Amino acid sequence: MRCGVCTYSVAVSLLWGSTAAVAQGAGRVVLGTVVDTAGKRPIESVEIAIDGAPRARSSKAGEFTLTKVGSGQHMISLRRIGYAPLVDTLRVQASDTIRVKYRMQSVGAPLPTVTVSTQGRFDVLFTSGFDERRNYGLGKFLTPDDWRGRHNATLADILSADVPAVYMTDGAAASRRGGISKSGPCYLSVWLDGVRSLPRRLDQISTADIAGIEVYRGPSEVPLQYGGTGAQCGVLLIWTGRR
């Protein structure tokens, strides 16, 4: 007999639990609430992402709705400045409406270390939100300290050596996870100083000009402002502070 209400046990730190109520004709929808660890105060403006579906942000009541979620197993991530990031997996059936409730742990307002420098290019790491995103714990972050001593290393050399999920082809960064389709390699979406760029411009960027690099290896890691069309293979952010 088909159950009216099905409950899923999820072994995730800081997660209360996930319940799925089968609703005839409701479609593939995830309805959720985000609260603090005490379970009393709703958390607003949490960024919620699930692979293959439009993203959402929680309301003042801590509520969010994800629509157009395909059937099968999905990874869902929740991120907000001042809270530890949370990742969970959900299994969605063809006609399910999934109801979830998460609680996130406050880690206090992050206080990134900022080095006062006359070199303005390093200021961009603060003004662009680089340090805040690094505190989320998602993605790969590189600064000149990571390739110091590697004389004459190009951007392609650095990415190939430090980001195993990425490989270089024709001067562009491509995802190993995405593989190669009939249309060619699965290229990362490239942003230079916050502006969308061409994937094959990487060989034109000198490592001497780079203040920071961010690599997001799939849609579930990509920050909301850099997602959307073209980000399905991942995103590469390069900061020089020259714009």
Image (cartoon, grey):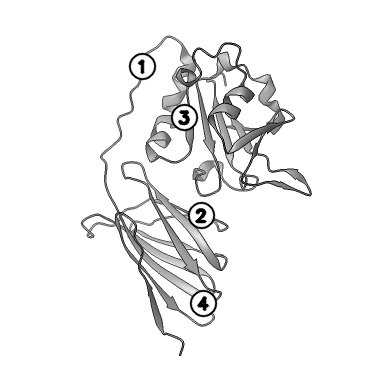
Image position, residue 163 (x, y; %): 55, 33
Pointer 1 residue: 115
Dot 3 or dot 4: first in sequence order is 4
Residue on which the image places disc 3: 128
Say which residue label 4 marks.
Answer: 26
Residue 97 in the figure: left or right of residue 34: right
Can residue 198 be seen here? The reply is: no
Residue that extends furthest to the top in the rendered view of this protein: 118
Of mark 1 and mark 3, the one earlier in the sequence is 1
Tag 4's secondary structure? loop
N-terminal of the pair, mark 3 or mark 2, is: 2
Residue designated by label 2? 55
Dot 4: within a 10 Å radius of its alpha carbon, few (fewer than 14), some, or many (20 or more) residues?
few
Q: Amino acid at mark 2?
A: Arg
Does the residue at mark 1 contact the one at mark 3 (Cβ under 8 Å)?
A: no
Most foreground residue, 2 or 109: 2
